[in-house]
Amino acid sequence: MMTRAYIGLGSNLDTPLSQLRSALKALAALPDTTLVSQSSFYASDPLGPADQPRYVNAVAALDTALSPLTLLDALQAIELEQGRTRKAERWGPRTLDLDILLYGEQQLDEPRLRVPHYHMHARAFVLYPLAEIAPQLNLPDGRALTELLNACPFVGLERVTETQCC
């Protein structure tokens, strides 16, 4: 049985657009998974330490038969293959960050995975790309994506093209 999962992508090191393009190819190659759609790329100000480059973000929709934790393992393997080093510092610079934003209608709160992603409702760099590919989406708790967008202004976010970025 296939489940629609939404994956947040972000990078601010080592040519971020290339990192995201490579990650999208890797997502499309996952077993028992189809890359259904992807948003445009958006530049955003970093969370956490301000002395780091801006991020480039996107959201991808997958139809997958992988379980949530198997999908998480696959995403973390892609991050490692693309040079991600996990450090104690949260929100620091990184070559690639892949987050499961939504996994069907499921709500999960496990030691390794919380779905829906715990701060997605307040992050423009997640909500606007998500709305681009799933404008009529409702979250598992019943809130409409449009409701979240109304409470999260398009501030510090910029749609980017290959010639504008990184």
Image (cartoon, helix red, strand yellow):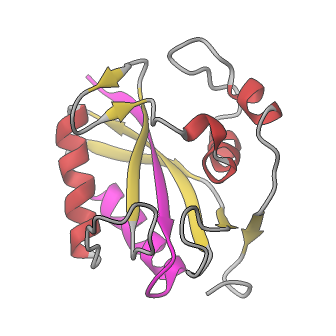
| Location of residue 121 in the rendering, given as x and y in whole percent from the top left corner | 62, 34
Task: Judge from the rendering whether residue 142 lies leftward or rightward of residue 118; answer left or right.
Answer: right
- Report the residue that reaches farthest toward the top: 142
Q: Does the magenta stretch include residue 12?
A: yes
Vertical comparison of 133 with 83: above or below: above
Q: Where is residue 72 in the image (x, y as percent from the top left)?
A: 25, 45
Per the image, is 110 magenta?
A: no
For the N terminus, the quadrant is top left
Image point (22%, 70%), residue name: 80
What is the x, y in percent for residue 82? 29, 76
Q: Residue at x 53, y 48 (%)?
A: 37
User: Residue 137 appears in which quarter of the rendering?
Assistant: top right
Image position of 97 with respect to 105: above or below? below
Relative horizontal placement of residue 104, taking residue 146 as reference (left or right) = left
Q: Considering depth in this image, is 101 or 29 the residue closer to the camera?
A: 101
- Left or right placement of residue 70 versus residue 12 in this view: left
At 29% from the left and 73% from the top, the residue drawn is 84
In the image, 125 versus 39, the foreground residue is 125
User: Foreground: 51 or 166?
Assistant: 51
In the rendered image, the quadrant that contains the C terminus is bottom right
Which residue is painted at 61% across and 20% down in the image?
138
Vertical placement of residue 69 versus 46, above or below: above
Q: How many dots with numbers?
A: 0
- Where are the magenta residues, as a range? 1-30
Q: In the picture shown, does residue 90 fall above or below 12?
A: above
**Residue 113's x, y, as percent?**
28, 36
| Quadrant in the rendering for residue 25 | bottom left
